[in-house]
Amino acid sequence: MPTMNPLDPTDPTAAALLLRSDTKHVATLTLNRPQARNALSKELIAALQAELDAIALDASVHVVVLAGAGPAFCAGHDLKDIRAAGYAPDYAEALFEACAQLMQRIVSLPQPVVARVHGIATAAGAQLVASCDLAIAADTARFATPGVNIGLFCSTPMVALSRNVSHKHAMQMLLTGELIDAATALRFGLINEAVPEVQLDAAVTTLAETIASKSRHTLMIGKAAFYQQAELPLAQAYDYAKGVMVANLQAHDAQEGIGAFIDKRSPVWCHGDAP
């Protein structure tokens, strides 16, 4: 992976929480609280939310990779912070609302997001994986929604989890709180691929750069349409998708791509919606 740089070297807090590197139209964001297994403090959530908001407007970024520094991807919320706040309802409301907004931002982000998972992804960390469009994990990675073990059901992780795996598999994870291995996560549909840890960076890079080589405009259309149609009844979904395809067909990159296919040449994307 490329060398990571602090988002803002003048801000030691931001620099400590999140790292970013860009190469070949791929922005890699690395959660950087390794001493806490990248637990999602309110500050880390805010830093990630702000960076995703900026990336949404960055035409140079076609794909985002989300990774974790140190021994784990993400261990969920920081329970020490929650206890230190006295379990206050106002604190909990603000924390879980910020987390919910972050997960929705990943889904609504114009660019596809790929999770690079190693170590553990538990509770809100598993929620992060489920919220990403794609996920590749080391075969040594482990996943869980273990809230039931400490008396706090993983209710917000449940939202993303239940939209990625079958109801039976989601309930198994939620009700037992047990760790599952990467092979099981793959079988459940939580991840796309499990690879040896030494191959993880190469697998993520290959996937991200393959996607980034496509028309950015087409990727944006496709991602937004996928989530929109998924919430619609069948007939409405087809009607919506039909309209998307008609509009998509008017874009420069669609006409360029069709022409290139017919002419047996490589397309030259403009990555925009210009006619």
Image (cartoon, rainbow, N blue to C red):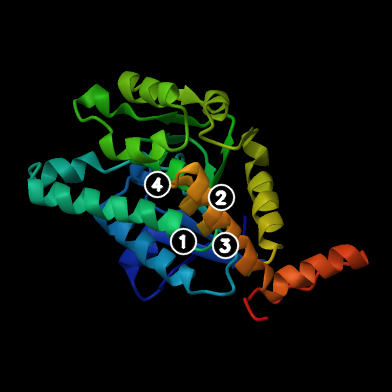
Q: Gap in Å between the C-alphas at discs 1 and 4?
A: 26 Å
**Residues at discs 1 and 2 in contact (Cβ within 8 Å):** no
The residue carrying pointer 4 sits among few (fewer than 14), some (14 to 19) or many (20 or more) residues within 10 Å by Cα, namely some
The residue carrying pointer 2 sits among few (fewer than 14), some (14 to 19) or many (20 or more) residues within 10 Å by Cα, namely few
Counting from the top left corner in percent of width and height, residue 142 is at 47, 29
Counting from the top left corner in percent of width and height, residue 176 is at 33, 18
Of circles 4 and 3, the one toward us is 3
Q: Secondary structure at mark 1?
A: loop
Q: Is residue 113 visible?
A: no
Q: Earlier in the sequence, mark 1 or mark 2?
A: 1
> Which label was assigned to residue 243?
3
Q: Residue at x 24, y 30 (%)?
A: 153
Q: Gap in Å between the C-alphas at discs 2 and 3?
A: 9 Å
The image quadrant where one finds the N terminus is: bottom right
Q: Which residue is mark 4?
A: 34
Image-based side of 136 in relation to 260, left or right: left
Q: Nearer the viewer, residue 33 or 116?
A: 116
In the picture as drawn, the residue positioned furthest to the bottom comes out as: 274
The image quadrant where one finds the C terminus is: bottom right
Of circles 1 and 3, the one toward us is 3
> Which label was assigned to residue 109?
1
Q: Quadrant of residue 173?
A: top left
**Residues at discs 1 and 4 in contact (Cβ within 8 Å):** no
Q: Which residue is mark 2?
A: 238
Q: Earlier in the sequence, mark 1 or mark 3?
A: 1
Q: Gap in Å between the C-alphas at discs 4 and 2?
A: 45 Å
Q: Gap in Å between the C-alphas at discs 1 and 3?
A: 21 Å
Q: Earlier in the sequence, mark 2 or mark 3?
A: 2
